[in-house]
Image: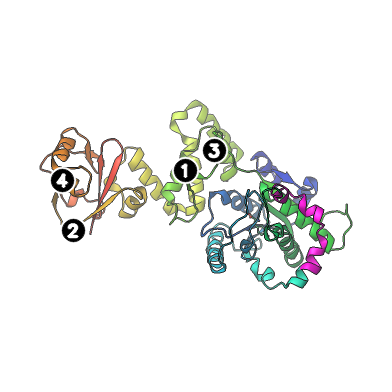
Amino acid sequence: MDVLQDLEWRGLINQVTDREGLHELLNNKQVTMYCGFDPTGDSLHIGHLLTIITLRRFQLAGHKPLALVGGATGLIGDPSGKKAERTLNEEDVVRMYTGRIKNQLQKYLDFDGSKKAEVLNNYDWIGSMDIITFLRDVGKHFGLNYMLSKESVESRIQSGISFTEFSYQILQSFDFYHLNKEQGCQLQIGGSDQWGNITAGLELIRRMKGGEEGDEPDAYGFTIPLVTKADGTKFGKTEGKAIWLDPEKTSPYEFYQFLINTDDRDVVKFLKYFTFLSEEEIQALEEELKTQPEERKAHRRLAEEVTRFVHGEEALKQAQHISEALFGGGDFKQLTADEVKQGFKDVPTHVVEEEEKGLIDLLVEAGISSSKRQAREDMKNGAVYINGERCQQMDKVIEEEDKIDQAFTIIRRGKKKYFLIQYA
Ligand SMILES: N[C@@H](Cc1ccc(O)cc1)C(=O)O
């Protein structure tokens, strides 16, 4: 199976310009290709992951990926897929975002050998372009009708679009032209909302090269589908929070949990999209999903593969360890301090100075029970758990052996309310 056939059965081809031609090209030579990422935040998020993984698939098939960070385009704002005009970020903020996203992209591609990836910043060629050159050499190739007919613009004519965002398509087109000319880049990929910008780039390449309409194309465009979920909600969020690729913003444990909680109806699709497992392996998991759904093998494999790709083996092991302790009847005391921090990130934490403390006092002091009377009541009712084990011993004193990795004690009150005691 070649790379395009592989992308096909995975359901990753949304639109392609000249499929036949691209197929032939990819089978006959090493193709340099690119995908751009605008620095709209200080981290990439899971919504960017599918294009990154797709670049990686091309690279594994022997092609050369360029990952472009939009240090220039990020200052302008792509109207594609956006209902309203964006507020501009300060230039130094965009510069900071650009640096961070560049570093992140470095983690996901291979930078050795003949098909080595490159991370580029379009500020390096757009930043220095003067307005006369822009209008004379580039703008002249864009008919107003053509620009207005792009979905990203047309859908905003009524609600409003500035000249700034309107011009965005010219900048992205220029990138494609520039990379085609300088690096022989012949393919641009992107999310489904990028079709208009990608085809505008192809048009610019043809015109700048003095080609005629209907000439054999020298470059190609390709979009992947928008990731949708069976329940109709937007992919990439849990409880309103985005799933970031930066482990400081979304811990590997949270990332793993996000994936393991995938709806049964979506799990096979996501295995195809986000993992490098073969057709046979995915079919076997699909079969198991039908025959032994309670095992959740497909979900676990999805979470495992994607967490490993994004965060590495070590972080994956930690995420699995924490999940086991929290949901699989594992022992909290086996956790490391770092794992406790990840697994209980949003849990109220109380810092104690003293070494040994009576549990009743601690429950009150940490605000877990409202009074000593309440604390005793809670314990009597069997509602208090120390590191996952019920505690009904009224004179219990927290000792060294109750401290996980000498740093934390996990207290649970009732079914789900967790608290952390941290030792200063
Ligand atoms: N417009 C793309 C990012 C991009 C920027 C520059 C390019 O040359 C290509 C793509 C987006 O918003 O996702």
> Are the residues flagged by discs 4 and 2 in contact, CB closer than 8 Å?
no
Q: Nearer the viewer, mark 2 or mark 3?
A: 3
Using the image as rendered, state which of residue 349 and residue 343 is in the foreground: 349
Residue linked to disc 2: 353
Question: Would residue 198 be seen by someone viewing this image from the given angle?
Answer: yes
Which residue is nearer to you in this view: 302 or 283?
A: 302
Q: Is residue 30 visible?
A: no
Q: Amino acid at mark 4?
A: Leu
Q: Amino acid at mark 1?
A: Thr
Q: Are marks 1 and 3 in contact (CB under 8 Å)?
A: no
- Residue 137 painted magenta: yes
Quarter location, residue 283: top right
**Amino acid type, mark 2:** Glu
Q: Earlier in the sequence, mark 4 or mark 3?
A: 3
Q: Earlier in the sequence, mark 1 or mark 2?
A: 1
- How was this image coloured? rainbow
Q: Which residues are magenta?
A: 135-157
Instruction: Give SS at disc 2.
Output: loop
114 horizontally vs 390: left or right = right
In three-dimensional space, the C-alpha distance between marks 1 and 3, rounded to whole angstroms, equals 10 Å
Residue occupied by mark 4? 359
Q: Which residue is mark 3?
A: 233
Give the structural element (helix, strand or loop) at label 3.
loop
Residue 70 quadrant: bottom right
Q: Residue at x 50, y 35 (%)?
A: 263
